[in-house]
Amino acid sequence: MNTALILAAQAASQGSPMPMIIMMVAIFAIMWFFMIRPQQKKQKAIRAFQNALSAGDSVVTGGGIYGTVKHIDLTTGKVDVEIARGVVITVDKSYVFGSVQASQQNQGK
């Protein structure tokens, strides 16, 4: 009988789980606004840049290589980038991250 009273008292003292649920939702919302949402915006901007890529654009690859786009093969998703006079490398279109002008502006900040 004492055990039943002790269990009933513990159940009554625990209260509602609602504050814990509200706190978890608040933490997720804060994470979404400060981490996930800005990353999604950045990815969207990179994808828009990659889709607007054309021959003659000065670009920076994911490996940090600066060059000029010479040819884009839309069927395979490969881009030929000239990194020096007469030196052309082929990279995947998804590894061309930005223009040279944008990267130089970011370094000046």
Image: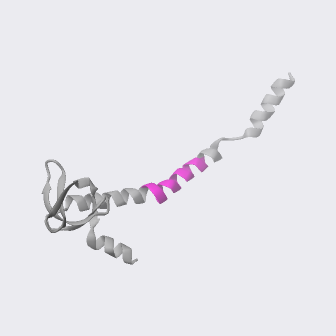
Of 3 and 40, which appears nearest the observer? Answer: 40
Q: Is residue 47 magenta?
A: no
Residue 61 x, y percent position in the rendering:
28, 61
> Which span of residues is magenta-colored?
22-36
Residue 81 x, y percent position in the rendering:
18, 61
Residue at the farthest right position: 2
Examine the rendered structure and indicate whether residue 100 appears above or below residue 7.
Answer: below
Residue 63 x, y percent position in the rendering:
31, 59
Of 18 and 64, which appears nearest the observer? Answer: 64
Examine the rendered structure and indicate whether residue 107 appears above or below residue 18.
Answer: below
Residue 31 x, y percent position in the rendering:
51, 54
Residue at the farthest bottom position: 108
Q: Is residue 35 magenta?
A: yes
**Dominant secondary structure (helix, strand or loop) of the stretch shown in magenta:** helix
Please tell me in which quadrant of the rendered image residue 101 appears. bottom left
Please tell me in which quadrant of the rendered image residue 108 appears. bottom left
Q: At 41% from the left edge and 60% from the top edge, which residue is drawn? A: 38
Locate the N terminus by quadrant.
Answer: top right
Q: At 47% from the left edge and 54% from the top edge, which residue is drawn? A: 32
Of 33 and 54, which appears nearest the observer? Answer: 54
Tell me if 107 is positioned left or right of 93 in this view. Answer: right
Please tell me in which quadrant of the rendered image residue 70 appears. bottom left
Q: At 72% from the left edge and 40% from the top edge, which residue is drawn? A: 15
Examine the rendered structure and indicate whether residue 102 appears above or below residue 36.
Answer: below
Q: How is the image coloured?
A: one colour
Of 101 and 23, which appears nearest the observer? Answer: 101
Tell me if 10 is positioned left or right of 54 in this view. Answer: right
Locate the C terminus by quadrant.
Answer: bottom left
Label total for image = 0
Examine the rendered structure and indicate whether residue 3 appears above or below residue 58.
Answer: above
